[in-house]
Amino acid sequence: MSAAGARHAYEVNRARIASLWAEARPVSADDAAGRYLARSGVALGAWPQALRLHPALDYWHMQADRKPVCLGRFPALLALFEVDTYPRGLQGAPVPHAVALQRIYLAADGSLAPVPAPIKLTGKAGPALGACARLAHAVSASRVMGMAVGIATALRIAQAARMPVWAVPEASLLAHARWPRGLRSLHVFIDVREPAQWQPAAELARKASACGLQVFPMVADMAHAEGVHTVPQFTATRL
């Protein structure tokens, strides 16, 4: 794709992300998104601003003949993924830039919607490598924070470890996660059930250590039975 074509695609995606975000509303405990998070073991009094509920989002599926078909409209948890930009140079204050939305399609009871792939990312509204769902304000993460894969996983870890935790959408992107300025200590959480997270976690730990951060790789036992309150267990590890 040409540079002009890429810029056009970014602009189209930017407009779509802004439109979906404007159509969504804050998460509440009694909506599909709140029920989904509760079923996943998350119990919060206030939901992060990076999460919203879209009440009825079209689900499009590409058929084998490459023709798209709409399989219905479903409530969807939207997670905003952002990267920092520096329009005034690296000495200026960073400006967050929304580059993608993760859409988690749901049934009314908070279970995943009965569709082929209930978790999807929108097209990107700019270079997105390093983008995170900022499930806590950067200012609250100025000294110590964690990185994890997945929205519900990051929220469960945050409430158990009592620290801000940001999320990347998939394991391979953990290696490129960008932490906020001023951070001193980074906890890199690896879900014990997901062996694909080890290598990217090691790469993130290497980068953070090279930048002078204290790095604490942690294995998280995320075992969870629906309807039963369980707390993740953490074990320090070496990468």
Image: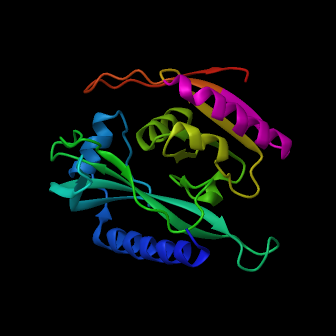
Q: Which of 122 and 81 is in front in this view?
A: 122
Q: Main secondary structure of the magenta part?
A: helix
Q: Which residue is depicted at the point 45% across and 36% down?
A: 153
Q: Which residue is depicted at the point 64% across and 35% down?
A: 200
**Could you tell me if residue 123 is visible in this image?**
yes
> Looking at the picture, how far across and down is residue 43, in whole percent?
36, 40
> Looking at the picture, how far across and down is residue 187, in whole percent?
67, 36
Q: In this view, does 60 lie to the left or right of 192?
A: left
Q: Is residue 38 left or right of residue 12?
A: left
> Looking at the picture, how far across and down is residue 231, in whole percent?
44, 25
Q: Which residue is depicted at the point 27% across and 26% down?
A: 226
Q: Does the magenta stretch include residue 119?
A: no
Q: Give the range drawn in magenta.
A: 194-217
Q: Nearer the viewer, residue 79 or 42?
A: 79
Q: Which residue is depicted at the point 82% across and 73% down?
A: 91
* 18 w.r.t. 146: above or below: below
Residue that extends furthest to the front in the rendered view of this protein: 65
> Looking at the picture, how far across and down is residue 34, in whole percent?
28, 48
